[in-house]
Image (cartoon, rainbow, N blue to C red):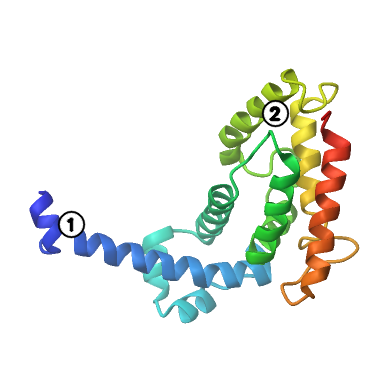
Amino acid sequence: MVGRGASGRGSGGYGEGVGAERTRQRILEAATEEFAAHGLAGARVDRIAARSGMSKPMLYSHFGAKERLFDAVFDAHVLANAQRVPFTAADPADYARRLYDDYLADPALMRLVMWKRLEQEPAGYLYAGNEGIDEANLADIAEQQRAGVLRPDLDPADLWTLLIATAAAWAQGSVTVVADRGDPHPVHQRRRAALGEVVDAALRLR
């Protein structure tokens, strides 16, 4: 079985698997642009198909309904963010700065977050699939609270929420200023420094 897969021949071989994954990625990339711009309700499957170079039946064969495609796009961006920016409870200021950088690099993420809040999850957990990740992060926060690094008077869930919200101060959805990759470098440096100082002052004991 391994040999046939490596050759890329035969039904279900490696080559077919790679091709299917490439097709899926093309659809996800096209759908990201569409959903980030128009949300779930406003997105058009025919535009996604045209942008990806696929037919509508091909899209439906991979993802089924438009809602499932939106969920797949959202899941992919959330998972990628968690992988690119691993949480460090012992240094929340550094984590906040790295999140700032990642929000700049992937502006579609926060646009998708806003659409999901508006159209699917107006209250409570934004992303059910994130609960397992959050549980591990909350355990790390509690450990650092016991170690005297983070404030013990805050519930770990509240501390986590405050940290994420602070890091997203300049992200898409800000009610004041949205950071842009084209902003001058000194401006980004100033914001990153401010993030670190505010997070340390608010959440750390030492």
Q: Earlier in the sequence, mark 1 or mark 2?
A: 1
Quick check: 172 left or right of 28? right
Q: Which residue is mark 1?
A: 12
Q: Is residue 175 above or below residue 136?
A: below
Indicate the amino acid at tag 2: Ile
Residue 66 position, x and y percent, is 53, 62
Furthest toward the right, the residue is 176
Which one is nearer the viewer's eye here, 14 or 71? 14
Q: Which residue is mark 2?
A: 141
Quick check: 16 left or right of 67? left
Which one is nearer the viewer's eye here, 162 or 64? 162
Residue at image x 45%, y 69%?
Answer: 27
Quick check: 112 left or right of 187? left
Q: Secondary structure at mark 2?
A: helix
Furthest toward the front, the residue is 206
Spatial CA distance of label 1 from label 2 is: 44 Å
Pick the quarter of the image with the C terminus.
Answer: top right
**The image quarter in which residue 21 lies:** bottom left
Report if residue 131 is visible in the image.
yes
Q: Is residue 159 above or below residue 36?
A: above
Residue at image x 61%, y 67%?
Answer: 35
Q: Is residue 130 above or below residue 7?
A: above
Which one is nearer the viewer's eye here, 165 or 32? 165
Residue 38 position, x and y percent, is 67, 70
Residue at image x 38%, y 70%?
Answer: 57
